[in-house]
Amino acid sequence: MTAILLRMTTDAGEMSLTVDELAARAGVTVRTVRFYGSKGLLPPPEIGPRRVGRYGAGHVARLALIEELQRQGMTLAAIERYLRQLPSDLSPHDLAIHRAVVASWAPDAVETLSLAELERRAGRALSERDMERLGAMGVLVADGEAEAFRVDSGLLRLGLELLDVPLSQEAILAARKVLLEHSRAAAHELARLFRGEVAERDNRDVRDLSAHMHPLVVQALLTTFQRSLREELSEWIRGSGAG
């Protein structure tokens, strides 16, 4: 486990992108990247040789989260408030998880991409095994055309992050089943609670409550889940004597 975490940290630290490469990786324009930077939503790049700005994995993950929040209809001011509430030490992987959960509140965001475009978004060549693993995670399915795929854009970045984690396809499928079952159970109970709160209110109040509750519930679920997972993994590592 320690080796996995070290590898993920090293990979994140080694990523170095120009603003053009960052924009291509995130599927946005360079102008959009610079705009977010000017608003303080995206941290400034590291300045390298010849004063060229270099961006890392944290910028990629944060930019993807910003884009997802904007697709949800949040204003720039609301996005800024949301980002300020996040813990300052979130890793790129943590940010990718936030984006995936935030995306789950929105209607399905499915794109049809060619293999070339998918690899451009990934910033790497994708092997047949990579594609099988992305399919097992529910990130993509073949579209029936030559090298075309229907891609869940909300899950794509997280799926790509997980490609290098040494888990079998069977373990990925089992983990996905566990997460779906428990998240649906939690959603059912939360919906039941909310229905009780809004039963006597008019439609406008219900919509307002829904809009305010979504980001709060997402953050609460993520914080609770991440804390519980760290505790479980720490106990496992201590019990197994892994170092």
Image (tube, helix red, strand yellow):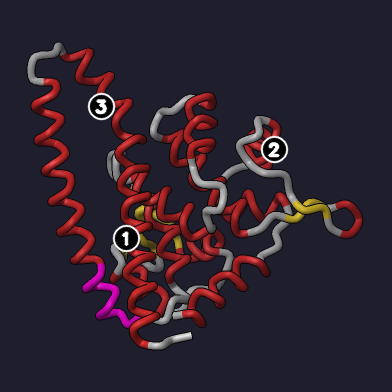
What's the amino acid at mark 3? Ser
What's the amino acid at mark 2? Arg
In the drawing, does residue 15 fall left or right of residue 212?
right
Q: Mark 2: which secondary structure?
A: helix
Magenta-colored span: 167-175
**Above or below for 65 versus 171:** above
Identify residue for label 1: 228
Identify residue for label 3: 210
Q: Mark 1: which secondary structure?
A: helix
Asked whether 47 or 2 is in front, the reply is: 2
**Disc nearest the viewer among 3 and 2:** 3
Residue 177 image point, x, y percent: 19, 66
Residue 162 image point, x, y percent: 43, 69
- Figure quadrant of the N terminus: bottom left
Give the mark nearest the N terminus, 1 or 3: 3
Residue that appears at 52% across and 38% down: 83
Q: Residues within 10 Å of mark 1 (few under 14, many from 20)?
A: few
Instruction: Based on the picture, tell me whether residue 91 belongs to the magenta stretch.
Output: no
Asked whether 22 or 112 is in front, the reply is: 22
Residue that appears at 63% across and 49% down: 23
Q: Mark 3: which secondary structure?
A: helix
**Disc nearest the viewer among 1 and 3:** 1
Identify residue for label 2: 34
